[in-house]
Structure formats: structure tokens, C-alpha cells
Amino acid sequence: MSDKTPLNIGMIGYGFMGRAHSNAYCKVGNFFDTKYQPVLKAACARSQESVQAFADNWGYETIETDWRALLERDDIDAVDICVPNNLHREIALAAADAGKMILCEKPLAMDTAEGEEMCQAVEAAGVANMVWYNYRRVPAVSLAKQLIDEGRLGKIFHYRSVFLQDWTISEDLPQGGEALWRLDVDAAGSGVTGDLLAHCIDTAIWLNGGISTVSAMTETFIKERTHQLTGEVQKVGIDDACAFLARFENGSLATFESTRYARGHKALYTLEINGEHASISWDLHDLHRLSYFDHRDDSLVRGWRSIHVTDGDMPYMDKWWVPGLQIGYEHTFVHQVADFLESLETGEPASPTFRDALETQKICDAVLDSAQSGQWTEI
Ligand SMILES: NC(=O)c1ccc[n+]([C@@H]2O[C@H](COP(=O)([O-])OP(=O)(O)OC[C@H]3O[C@@H](n4cnc5c(N)ncnc54)[C@H](O)[C@@H]3O)[C@@H](O)[C@H]2O)c1
């Protein structure tokens, strides 16, 4: 019998993230020595049959088909919001009102105004809260943060990041409904900006501090698509591609680019940072490696080194296998749950909180405003 304190999870949504998070709740207690142990108490989605199948697969004890009923239950401690973006606000406000802890998927909200309302709600209710910007918890990215914070790069001049995909190039692809809600602006809020660049921005401000001003351009390459739910041909309201320039508060310059029209790329998330003494770069396709160049090395052996982030003194890696054996994408969610559970013990909030994630929301809004106005936009 475990002497851990149970933390009863109510999961809303059983799609991509519902699965990724369920896996993390199942695994975390086996690898991390935390006081709290997630218990898969209830899964919720609209279709009884589908949510039952999901619950059976992952071991959820019960199901609900209305998230309001989930929030009314006394046996739920924490609510996990894994539904399309247009539902985050309403569920989060109600969950805060019901006194539940909230783990919310990114982007926090449809826009900054919604996000601010959500921050105020969790702060007024005093409930623990966190947003799933999981790439912070890739050990190589966490190591990058450590190297930057130790001052190894010196003054930072440049930050460069892209997130490229190619899955919406076909004109025949409908928009809206299950699986394609990301193409429907009413469900997603924006296109690649809130979906993909939000990740790049969150990582960037975590690694390199605040962004002060942006200048952006966006494009919607396919202007009309059939809506999957109504069958009507409707204007496409999302940005298919977005590129922007940014200035950080520390004086460094940045370029960000994201598109779903980069043929050949499925999820190419890369970042590179150039400092006075050293540079680092990272690539999601090789996520267990961090590239590092240090100009202070002896010139005869100076060059880019590829650090295999698997040793026990590297972030999170003492919890996994032995040096030389790598971990992958799903572990980033395990790390985030572990940090959340630890935060309940220490009382120190796990980042990014709703308030932290609001910063990314503000930058996304500024990017979209700038693309529309053609002007530089202050954050
Ligand atoms: N952190 C990441 O890397 C990452 C990756 C993918 C998605 N996301 C975010 O996670 C969220 C969900 O995305 P996804 O890819 O899992 O989507 P998905 O389409 O795979 O799943 C969405 C789920 O929401 C459910 N749902 C929709 N309306 C509902 C309602 N009214 N009540 C209950 N359930 C409802 C659907 O049935 C489905 O189970 C989005 O906010 C998205 O931006 C984050």
C-alpha cells in the first residue's frame, strides 16, 4: 500500500493531449519520489462510448459526459483541461470557482483579455495552476536554461526559432470539428501563432527574458475551406504562416517563423541562441541532444559539440535509465507533472503558471496585431 497522498485527477478531453497527460500521471510515481500520487479518478468528454473506451484504456475509475458535472464532484482535486482553445476560459473559470486545482493546455486562452480573466480567477480562488508548455521540460532545453543562467553564453545577441509543419497544404482539407478544430478560428483563436509559435515564445522568454516589441507578417494561403460541421464553404480565419522579428528586453534581436506549409517538415521545432562567449542550438527531432559552441575553448579543438543529455547530473536524467540511454517526447509531460506535484509540497508554484503563460498570450496578440497593422507593436 502506497503511503503517498492521492491527488484525484479529472481529465477533460481524450485526444492527443488527453493521452499524453494520462500517460504522465500513470508513470510519474514510478520514477519520481513525490509526496502526491495522481489518481485517474474521472475522464470527461461528450461521447459516452468514446470516453468510456478511453477510461478503460488508461484506467480512469469513472466517466462524465458534461464537464460541469465533473466540477461538481467532491472527489476531484485537480482538473486537466485538454480541449480546444475556445473552451479553456469557461472551464477554467468554473473550475476555479469550484476550488479545483487546474492544469490547462496551451495556449492559455483565445486572447489576452480572456487570459487575464483566467489569471484573476485562479488567483482569487487561491488554487494551484499551471499551463502545459511542456518543451521547457525537455532535459536538453532545461540544460540550455542552466547554461544561460550560469552566464556561460555571456551577453546574448540573437535568438532564432522556427516551428514548421506541412499538414494543411491540401485545398481539400476541411476546417472545424473533431481533429480539424485548429483550422477553425472560432475554436482555435488563431493559427500557427497560438498553436506553434506560442511554444517558441514560451521557451524564448523562459530562456532569454521578456520581449518588448514585435513586427510580424502572417498569411492565409488557402482562403476558403468547407466547414466539417456545417458543410458550408467558409472563409478561413486563421494564420497559416507567421514570421516575426522581436526585440528582447536584454537588447537581443530575434526571428521567429512558423508555418503549416513547409513541405517535408512534420514538427521541426528548433532554436538557436548566440552569445558573446558561446552559442547553443536545439532541434526537437534530436531532442536529447544540445549543441554547444564555446569560443573560449582551445582553438585547436574549438567547434560545435553535440551534448548527449543523458547523464545523471543533467536535468531530470537521474530519474530515468543509465548514462547514454535517452528519453523522448512523452517524458516532458512526466517531468511537468512531477514538478507540479513537487510544487504542492513546497508551496512554490510550478511554472508556467497562468500568470506566466499570460506573457506568451500577450506576445501572440501583439504579433497578430502587428501583422494586421503592418507596424511594430509594443508588448
Ligand atoms: N503542449 C502541447 O505540446 C500540445 C500539443 C497538442 C495540443 N495542445 C493543446 O491541447 C488542447 C487539446 O488539443 P488536442 O491536440 O489534444 O486536441 P484533440 O482534438 O486531439 O482532442 C480534443 C478533445 O477535446 C474533446 N472535447 C471537445 N469539446 C469538448 C467538450 N465540450 N467537453 C468535453 N470534451 C470536449 C474532444 O472530444 C477531444 O477528446 C488544445 O488547447 C491544444 O492547443 C498542446
Image: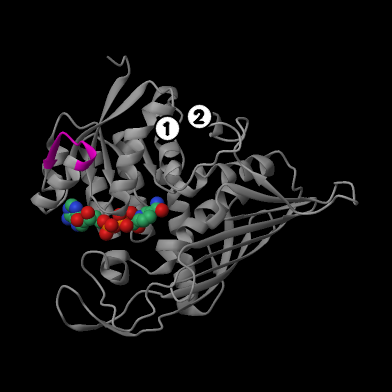
Q: Position of residue 218 (x, y in %)?
A: 47, 77
Compute the Cα span from label 2 to label 1: 11 Å
Mark 2 nearby-residue class (10 Å; few <14, some 14–19, many ≥20): some
- Drawn side of residue 41 relative to residue 248, left or right: left
Given residues 22 and 236, the one toward you in this image is 22
Which mark, residue 338? Answer: 1
Q: Quadrant of ligand 1?
A: bottom left
Given residues 285 and 237, the one toward you in this image is 285
What residue range appears in magenta? 57-63
Q: Position of residue 255 (x, y in %)?
A: 61, 67
Mark 2 or mark 1: whose residue is earlier in sequence: 2
Q: Looking at the image, what colour scheme do you see?
A: one colour
Can residue 48 be seen at all in this image of the molecule? yes
Residue tagged by mark 2? 319
- Drawn side of residue 369 relative to residue 52, left or right: right
Q: Is residue 75 above or below residue 150?
A: above
Q: Amino acid at mark 1?
A: Ala
Given residues 249 and 154, the one toward you in this image is 154
Can residue 107 be seen at all in this image of the molecule? no
Q: Amino acid at mark 2?
A: Lys
Disc 1 is placed on an element classified as helix
- Drawn side of residue 88 relative to residue 207, left or right: left
- Drawn side of residue 168 relative to residue 372, left or right: left
Inspect the magenta stretch and tell me whether residue 92 lies in it: no
Q: Which residue is at a point 28% across and 53% down the rendered structure image? A: 88
